[in-house]
Image (cartoon, helix red, strand yellow):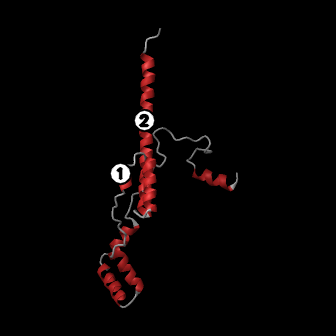
Amino acid sequence: MDDNQHAVAELLPKGVASLRNYRWQKGQSGNPKGRPPRGYATSERIRTALAEDLPEILAKVVEKAKAGDLAAAKIIMDRVVPAYRPVEEPLAVRSLVNAGSLTAQGEAIIRAVARGEIPLGQAAQLLIGMGSQARVQEMDALKRQLDELKELVSGKAHAPRR
């Protein structure tokens, strides 16, 4: 036996020569000790340990920020001031109102971008939404076809033979 086989043999239950022929007995647990109990997560332990000192720590960070420490100022700004997210105003694309098919709607969006009526970001979002809509329509059409085929097959099964 080589070192790996000896190591495996030491881990096997008593009376079992190899893993090849070993099987758990019915009703026998593969983990007799069970899952170990969960303790506090690391972050919970840290919060608990810092709870008493937190006001003092925050006061020190504010003091350093006021003294010109940019790292302390960044910590405060990241946690207190929300990140700027641009908000786009909704725009009506008149040429979409009368466009019938998804293809015509896509072309209308591209023309609206070319004319400067809508920003490129909004056009991209509209086209992504149209792609999702196309997939929904495809799934609806496939379901209708499948239902028709089932009806056709069940109708042949019940039709009298001549």
SS of the residue under disc 2: helix
On the image, the x and y values in percent for residue 162 come to 47, 8
In the image as oriented, which residue stretches furthest toward the top? 162
Q: CA distance from mark 2 to mark 1?
A: 28 Å
Looking at the rendering, which quadrant does residue 76 occupy? bottom left
**Who's the residue at 36% across and 79% down the image?**
77
- For the image, the number of numbered tags is 2
On the image, the x and y values in percent for residue 66 come to 34, 89
Asked if residue 81 shows in the view, the reply is: yes
On the image, the x and y values in percent for residue 1 come to 70, 51
**Who's the residue at 37% across and 57% down the image?**
93
Q: Nearer the viewer, residue 144 or 102?
A: 102
Asked if residue 34 shows in the view, the reply is: no
Q: Which amino acid does the dot numbered 1 rest on?
A: Val
In the image as oriented, which residue stretches furthest toward the right? 1
SS of the residue under disc 1: helix
Q: Is residue 128 left or right of residue 1?
A: left
The label number, if any, that marks residue 97 in the structure image = 1
Which is closer to the viewer, label 2 or label 1? 1
The label number, if any, that marks residue 143 in the structure image = 2
* Mark 2 touches mark 1? (CB < 8 Å): no
Q: Which amino acid does the dot numbered 2 rest on?
A: Lys
Q: Is residue 26 left or right of residue 61?
A: right
**Who's the residue at 42% across and 42% down the image?**
137
- Mark 1 packing: few (<14 Cα in 10 Å), some, or many (20+)? few
**Who's the residue at 42% across and 45% down the image?**
101
Relative height, residue 68 to residue 80 (above, below): below
Q: Nearer the viewer, residue 161 or 14?
A: 161
Relative height, residue 21 to residue 72 (above, below): above
- Mark 2 packing: few (<14 Cα in 10 Å), some, or many (20+)? few
